[in-house]
Structure formats: C-alpha cells, structure tokens
Image (cartoon, rainbow, N blue to C red):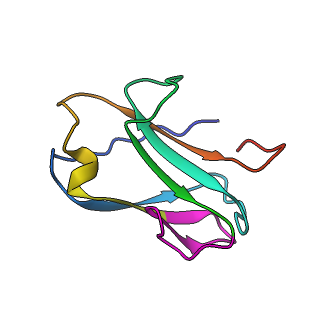
Amino acid sequence: MPVYTDISMLKFEDGTFVVSLAPAAPIGGFNLRWQVSKRFGSTSGLIVKSAASGYGNNVSGINVTNSGAGVMQITLNSADTSGLDYGNYVYALERLDSGSRT
C-alpha cells in the first residue's frame, strides 16, 4: 500500500531525506531503486537512485541506515534537480530482486 508524503525542494538544491517502510520490514541484501517521475506509471525516472547488495552505502544516492527496519536516506544533489520545472512529482521505491516487488 503506498504511503503519500509531501517533500518540498527547490531547483538546484541539495537535500537528504529519510524513507521508512511502513510497516517496517528488513531490507538487508536487497537491490533497491528509488525514482522521481512526473506521474505514477511513468516508464522512465527523471531522478534515479539505487542501492545494490554487495556495494557500500550511498554509492548511488541510497544509504541504508537500518536494514532490519527498512530505513534509508536518499541523497539528492543540485544536479539531480537542475532540470526539473516547478510542479508536482511522484516518487517510488522498488525492490528489484528477481521474483520480488516491494
């Protein structure tokens, strides 16, 4: 079930925010993708961050801070938001492991 939140950022702004699974669930060893799109169901993300099992934290923008409870930080750099026009966007966090979708 999706959880709806509001996140406010300005163009060219850096930011880090926390994403927590609800209900809490372990995510250790998961391959994750977080992406911002103009609307749900878009095939390509305007901003894409990922975390892969076996790689260090924050290699591509996701830093798992509590793998047992499903808590992570997403880091956006000014370059990530530089091409976005003012408006509303959606984000989705997905598990990419074969046979799984969270």
In the image, taking residue 88 as reference, residue 32 lies left or right, namely right
In the image, taking residue 93 as reference, residue 36 lies left or right, namely left
Residue 77, position in %: x, y?
Answer: 27, 58
In the image, taking residue 79 as reference, residue 4 lies left or right, namely right
40 up-or-down from 61: above or below: above
In the image, taking residue 49 as reference, residue 85 lies left or right, namely left
Residue 17, position in %: x, y?
Answer: 37, 60
57 up-or-down from 100: above or below: below
Residue depicted at 47% across the width and 42% down the height: 35
Relative depth, front residue between 51 and 20? 51
Is the magenta region chiefly helix, strand or loop? loop
Residue 37, position in %: x, y?
Answer: 41, 31
Residue 63, position in %: x, y?
Answer: 49, 69
Please identify the residue farthest to the right as the structure is shown.
Answer: 99
Q: How many marks?
A: 0
Residue depicted at 76% across the width and 50% down the height: 97
Residue depicted at 68% across the width and 67% down the height: 53
Residue 84, by quadrant, is top left
Question: Which corner quadrant holds the N terminus?
Answer: top right
Residue depicted at 54% across the width and 22% down the height: 41
77 within the magenta span: no
Relative depth, front residue between 94 and 53? 53
Find the magenta span and give its range.
Answer: 54-72
